[in-house]
Image (spheres, rainbow, N blue to C red):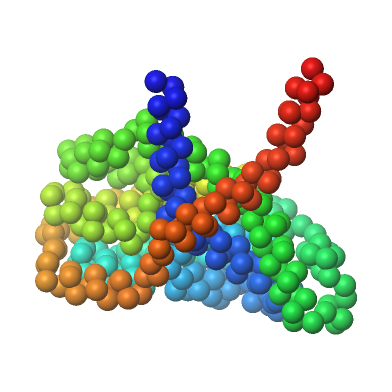
């Protein structure tokens, strides 16, 4: 019984990891290149301040990238450890998984212009709000420590003496063997916890809860979405079916906001690599704002909402959205998952080695 349960948890966790692993590897590479190729002075001018315009740049940049909430972890942390302030970092990490061109097209095609417009506006406003709160309430974590020693940390000499090839090589080394190892450790822990939750609380039960208008609570959906691993693009048709069956329209926005922008691997990584206050700001503002928008949508914005679902238009939208979505093959996903697991095991190896040595001595 226990062996079967563990097997289900591991297989479910691997399935979740396969959906995010390609983006994780891409983000490790991009984070490393960003860390070394862009000079600290330039990044400081772009994202190393508390300006509203800086938050807007970070939010819009995130809205244009089709990356899930797991894939954005190393990219956001790469920004932070390269000189971005906490506010722009959290704004970018919130906007990226919530809104992207494919998600917007699917929202207009499946949910209709009313819900989709609220979703689009909220997808911009909430990351901005999180960024503002982070800039105001952040303590020492407003800026990553040790930025002045960044060149020495990645094994380079004086910046004037380094070639572009050396920067790229050192950046990839930092992105994969430093950031990648650190993030993969917490991603594996988060994936195992997510797998445990899904096995204990099966998706059929969750779908039954979400699909029963009598049981739906916007506050409950906000918390549920924050725990689940949700891809905005993949869940929009599912949300449209729930709305068509009688669920309140605020449900769509609340679930897509909290579900797409939060998951356990992301929160654990943020807690370990930035700090507790960053997680509290991120999760509390996101859940509260998503609940408020969902509640206002039901009560004030769309009180007499009529479900929108035009199959012919939706098919056209799906085709266009598919052109904007990068599909990955199963072998590539498995290969990238193996890399993430190996990086995580490499991070855990010192602890495992100590345990083995103690047992050998005993």
Quick check: 150 above or below 282?
below
Figure disc tally? 0
Describe residue 298's horizontal placement relative to residue 15 as left or right: left
Q: Position of residue 232 (x, y in %)?
A: 35, 59
Point 24% across, 73% down: residue: 319
Q: Is residue 108 left or right of residue 223?
A: left
Q: Which image quarter holds the N terminus? A: top left
Where residue 70 sits: x, y (%)? 50, 55
Q: Between residues 255 and 338, which one lies in front from this camera angle?
A: 338
Residue at the spot x=27%, y=59% of the render? 236
Where residue 220 appears, x then y in whole percent? 33, 40
Q: Position of residue 255 (x, y in %)?
A: 33, 51
Q: Residue at x 70, y 34 (%)?
A: 352
Res 87 seen here: no
Hey, which quadrant is residue 105 in on the image? Answer: bottom left
Height in image: 165 above or below 48?
below
At 45% from the left edge and 52% from the top edge, which residue is drawn? 18
Hey, which residue is sitting farthest top in the picture? 362
Can residue 134 be seen here? The reply is yes
Q: Foreground: 104 or 323?
A: 323
As drawn, is 241 to the left or to the right of 151?
left
| Above or below, 16 relative to 168 | above
């Amino acid at each position: 019984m226990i062996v079967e349960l563990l097997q289900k948890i591991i297989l479910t966790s691997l399935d979740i990891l396969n959906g995010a692993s390609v983006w994780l590897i891409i983000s490790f590479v991009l984070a490393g290149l960003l860390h070394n190729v862009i000079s600290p002075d330039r990044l400081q001018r772009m994202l190393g301040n508390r300006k509203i315009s800086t938050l807007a740049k970070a939010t819009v940049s995130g809205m244009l990238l089709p990356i899930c909430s797991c894939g954005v972890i190393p990219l956001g942390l790469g920004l932070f450890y390269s000189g971005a302030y906490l506010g722009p970092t959290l704004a970018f990490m919130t906007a990226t998984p919530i809104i992207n061109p494919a998600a917007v097209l699917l929202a207009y095609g499946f949910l209709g212009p009313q819900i989709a417009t609220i979703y689009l506006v909220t997808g911009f406003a909430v990351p901005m709000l999180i960024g503002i709160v982070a800039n105001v309430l952040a303590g020492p974590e407003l800026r990553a420590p040790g930025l002045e020693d960044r060149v020495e940390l990645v094994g380079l000499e004086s910046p004037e003496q380094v070639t572009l090839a050396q920067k790229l090589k050192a950046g990839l080394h930092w992105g994969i063997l430093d950031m990648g190892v650190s993030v993969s450790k917490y991603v594996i822990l988060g994936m195992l916890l997510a797998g445990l939750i899904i096995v204990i609380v099966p998706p059929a039960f969750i779908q039954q809860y979400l699909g029963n208008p009598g049981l739906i609570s916007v506050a409950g959906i906000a918390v549920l979405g924050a725990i689940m691993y949700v891809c905005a693009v993949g869940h929009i048709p599912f949300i449209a079916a729930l709305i068509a069956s009688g669920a309140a329209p605020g449900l769509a926005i609340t679930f897509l906001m909290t579900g797409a922008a939060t998951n356990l691997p992301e929160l654990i990584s943020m807690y370990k690599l930035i700090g507790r206050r960053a997680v509290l700001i991120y999760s509390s503002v996101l859940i509260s704002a998503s609940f408020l928008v969902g509640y206002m949508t039901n009560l004030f914005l769309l009180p007499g909402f009529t479900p929108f679902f035009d199959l012919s238009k939706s098919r056209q939208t799906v085709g266009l959205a598919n052109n904007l979505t990068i599909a990955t093959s199963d072998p590539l996903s498995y290969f990238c998952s193996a890399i993430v697991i190996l990086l995580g095991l490499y991070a855990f190896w010192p602890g495992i080695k100590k345990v083995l040595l103690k047992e050998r001595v005993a």
